[in-house]
Amino acid sequence: MTKSVLIVNGPNLNMLGKREPEIYGHTTLSDIEQKCSSHAKELGLSIEFMQSNHEGDLVNTIQDAHGKHAGIIINAAAYTHTSVALMDALKAVGLPVIEVHLSNVFAREDFRHKSYISFAATGVICGLGAKGYILALDALTEIFDQ
């Protein structure tokens, strides 16, 4: 049976490629989804890819992952630094979680150095752009094989 991975993207990531390209690059979220889909197939995984600017939609999607997905990749974007609700949802589903950030959050403003998502994450990848999602799929594959 093919294992499924939920890939969750938070607020403003729908603007990738247009928003602050000097920080986030020119790759769009659609580009990232295509790369993830292709790489997941190579790994024998399936993915569900979603983005929302609404915290409640993200929480509902994470809660729905229980019994449906084997792991979660999350780029919570700005909610990383504010959302206890997302952290609690991730902990509640009990799945391996890889937190991804396109930029190196530790080289940016101080408020970005705090992550509520990290309290629920198995691992964190930051600063490697869209490649971080691919590395997260690889990491989950290794976790699944343990």
Image: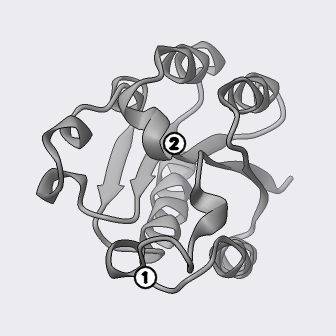
**Residue matched to label 2:** 76
As helix, strand or loop, the secondary structure at mark 1 comes to: loop
At 51% across and 42% down in the image, what residue appears? 76
**Residue matched to label 1:** 25
Query: Quarter-wise, where is residue 53 in the image?
Result: top right
Answer above or below: position of 31 versus 125: below
Drawn side of residue 88 relative to residue 129, left or right = right
As helix, strand or loop, the secondary structure at mark 2 comes to: loop
At 76% across and 40% down in the image, what residue appears? 69
What amino acid is found at the position of numbered circle 2 in the picture? Answer: Ala
At 41% across and 30% down in the image, what residue appears? 117
Q: Residue 53 versus residue 138: which sits nearer the camera? A: 53
Drawn side of residue 24 relative to residue 6, left or right = left
Query: Quarter-wise, where is residue 41 in the image?
Result: bottom right
Answer above or below: position of 57 versus 29: above
**Residue 59, label in figure:** none
Drawn side of residue 55 relative to residue 102, left or right = right
What amino acid is found at the position of numbered circle 1 in the picture? Answer: Gly
At 62% across and 66% down in the image, what residue appears? 15
Name the residue furthest front: 19
Drawn side of residue 48 relative to residue 42, left or right = right
